[in-house]
Image (cartoon, rainbow, N blue to C red):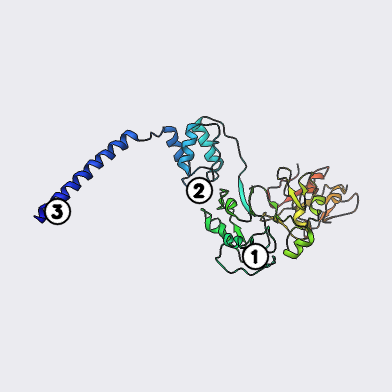
Amino acid sequence: METIGILKAVIGLGGLSLLFGLVLAIAFKKLAVQVSEKEKKIRELLPSTNCGACGFPGCEAYAHALAAQTDEVSPNLCTVGGSETAKKIGEVLGVEVEETEPQICVLRCRGGWNEAVEKFKYVGPGDCRSNYILLGGNKACEYGCLGGGHCVTICPFGAIKMGQNHLPIVDPDKCTACGICVKECPRHVLELIPRSQLIYLACKTRDKGKAVKNACKVGCIGCTLCVKVCPHEGAIAMDGNLPNMDFEKCVSCGICFNKCPTKSFVDRAKARPYAIISSQCDGCAECVKVCQFKAIEGEPGKRHVVIKDKCIGCGRCFEVCPIKVITMAGALGYAEAA
C-alpha cells in the first residue's frame, strides 16, 4: 500500500510539473519581448562590460534605449568602446555622431603619508569610506585623498592600484574613463580630464596658505604664481584660494608645473622636448625675452644657443621666433619650424 501511495504521489507531481512546464513554455513564446534587428546589431557593437558609465544598468539597456531612438540618448555614451564604437552605432542608427574628447581619470591630490599631516591615528577597516565616516577622515586636510583604496576595489577594469605612498595610481592604458571611481570617492579627489591634457593641478584645498602648510607639504597655497607666469591668457585663473585651469586654453606647456613652489601640479608627459636653434638665427633675442628659465643665451645679432639642462620644452621660443629657425626636438609631437 505504501508503495502504491508513493507511486501516485510521484505521478501526480510529475504530471503537475509537466503541466506547469507547458504553461511556462507557451507564456514564454506568447509574451516574449521581440528584439529588433537594430537592437541586436547595437548589442554586438557594445563591449558587454556592463559598467554603467553610460548611465544605464548595462549594455543591453543602453542598446534598447538607442534602438528606440529617443532624442535624449546619445550614441557616444560608451566610454569603454570609445569613438570607434560610437561611429559604428551611428551608422546603424543612421545618424551623425559628434566627436568627443577621450578622457582619463586623475587624482587631484599629492598628499600621501609622507606629505600630509594626520589629525588622529585611524584604526579600523582599511577602506576610505569607513575612515571618512569617522569625523570626516584622519587627515588634517579635509580635501585630500584618504588612501584607503576604495577606488581600487570598485574599478571594474583593474586600472587603479595603490602606490607605496598610499595614494592611488591610475594606469592610463587600462582606464576607460567610466567614472565609477569618481562617483564613489568620498573626498571627490578623482576627476575625469581630457586624455590629451598633460598638466593639471593635483590639489583641491580651499584653505588659505598658512592652514595648507600646516596640513600638507605639497598643497596649493594660493600664491597665484601660476596665474602670473602662464603665457596663455585665461588658461589659469584664481577661484578663491585655488587656481582653476581652463583645459580649452591650456596647451600643457609645463611652465606652471616647473614654477610652482609647492609642486602642486602634475605633468603626465613621459618626456619633454627641448629647443634647438639653427645656424640661420639672426640673434634678434625674441626667444630670450619669453624664456622664463634663462635657458637661451647669446650676443645680439649672433646665433643664440639653448642650455639644454635648463630648457623645459615649453615651446614659447618656438612660437615667437620671427624667422622660424627654432626646432622642438624630442617628445610631444613637436615639429621642425617651416
Q: Which of marks 1 and 2 is nearer the N terminus?
A: 2
Mark 3 is on which residue type? Ile
Please give the label number shown on residue 138: 1
Residue 106 badge: none
Horizontal side of 305 relative to 184 (left or right) equals right
For residue 6, the mark is 3
Image height of 295 relative to 193, above or below: below
Label 3 or label 1, whichever comes before in sequence order: 3
Q: Name the residue under label 2.
A: 51
- Secondary structure beneath dot 1 equals loop
Tell me the CA gap for discs 2 and 3: 51 Å
The residue lying at 26 percent from left, 38 percent from top is 23
Q: Mark 3 or mark 2, which is nearer the start of the sequence?
A: 3
Q: Is residue 72 left or right of residue 112?
A: left
- The x and y percentages for residue 145 are 64, 59
Q: Is residue 38 above or below residue 21?
A: above
* 100 or 337: nearer the viewer: 100
Image location of residue 69, percent across then percent down: 50, 31
State yes or no: discs 1 and 2 in contact (Cβ < 8 Å): no
SS at mark 3 in the image: helix
Give coordinates of residue 227: x percent, y percent. 80, 50
Q: Residues within 10 Å of mark 1 (few under 14, many from 20)?
A: many
Q: Are marks 2 and 3 in contact (CB under 8 Å)?
A: no
Q: Residue furthest top?
A: 94
The image quarter in which residue 40 lies: top left
User: Which of the pair 171/307 is nearer the observer?
Assistant: 171
Give the label, 2 or 3, closer to the camera. Answer: 3
**How far separated are the C-alphas under marks 1 and 2?**
31 Å
Q: Number of callouts in the render?
A: 3
